[in-house]
Image (spheres, grey):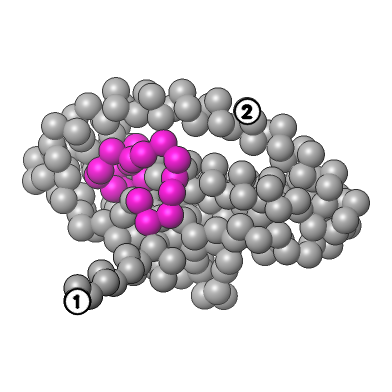
Amino acid sequence: MNEHPVTLHVMDDLRRSRLTVFFRYLLYIPHGIWLELWGIAVLVVALLNWLVALVIGRPAAPFQRFTAAYLRYWTTVYAYLMLVANPFPGFTGEPGSYPVELVVPTTPEKQNRLKTFFRMFLLLPTAVVLYVVLIPAMLICYPLLSFAWWAAMITGRMPRGFRDLGANAIRYTAQVEAYALLITGRYPCSSPYAGMSFEAPVAAEAPAAPSKA
């Protein structure tokens, strides 16, 4: 159960800028707008991808890359909003660009057509688990409404337990979305040990500097 193709890598050092914590909602606004616009395109692509997967038995490669990029970006935005990470994120979700990174398959895999057809019905149980996992994390980790916001404002650090709770909620939500968007046929797992890492993914490691002659 420890293996899942969608994994969240948390490399944050828990330090927080009190100024950016205080204005976190305002700083989120441009990302919120871009996330909504990108999400509309993802809904259209998801429907087309669902039809493609029913015909050929796997998602289309361009659609897979598009939705995977969106999911990586969504992860950085919500990690920032929920105080799981501090730096202001970029607008593309490029791998290796943020201390909280989602590793998600970009190469389509064969998927069962019957499960693909009933994917929305198969997602119903995850909605219940998502409510149980995500709502407490939102109440605790969201700024201005939370213990975590006050702790970060007073101490300049995010308590590790609150950070890990928010990260686990993001991880599970990302696995649910990846399953819904046909990025993977693996069912999401509510265990915090399935798809969570506190080390950098291999793909995100910086290459060694070339030696000078």
Q: Is residue 130 left or right of residue 164?
A: right
In this rendering, the answer to whether 171 lies above or below 63 is below
The image shows residue 89 at horizontal and vertical percentages of 33, 40
- In this rendering, position of residue 74 left or right of residue 156: right
For this rendering, which residue is in front, 125 or 57? Answer: 57
In the image, what residue type sits under mark 2?
Ile
Q: Quadrant of the C terminus?
A: bottom left
Q: Position of residue 192 (x, y in %)?
A: 45, 64
The quarter of the rendered structure image containing the N terminus is bottom right
Secondary structure under tag 1 reads loop
Whole-percent x, y for residue 171 in the image: 48, 55
Disc 2 element: helix
Q: Which residues are magenta?
A: 78-97
Tell me, yes or no, whether the two marked residues, 2 and 1, touch with CB atoms within 8 Å.
Answer: no
In the rendering, which numbered label is found on residue 75? none
Residue 50: quadrant of the picture: top right
Residue in the picture at 29% in, 61% down: 11
Residue type (three-letter) at the residue carrying disc 1: Ala
User: Which residue carries the number 2 mark?
Assistant: 40
What is the magenta segment's predominant secondary structure?
loop
Label 2 vs label 1: CA separation? Answer: 51 Å
Q: Around disc 2, counting alpha carbons within 10 Å, would you say few (fewer than 14), some (14 to 19), or many (20 or more)?
A: few
Magenta stretch: includes residue 88? yes
* Residue shown at the point (84%, 62%) measured from the top left: 112
Q: Which residue is mark 1?
A: 213
Q: Is residue 98 magenta?
A: no
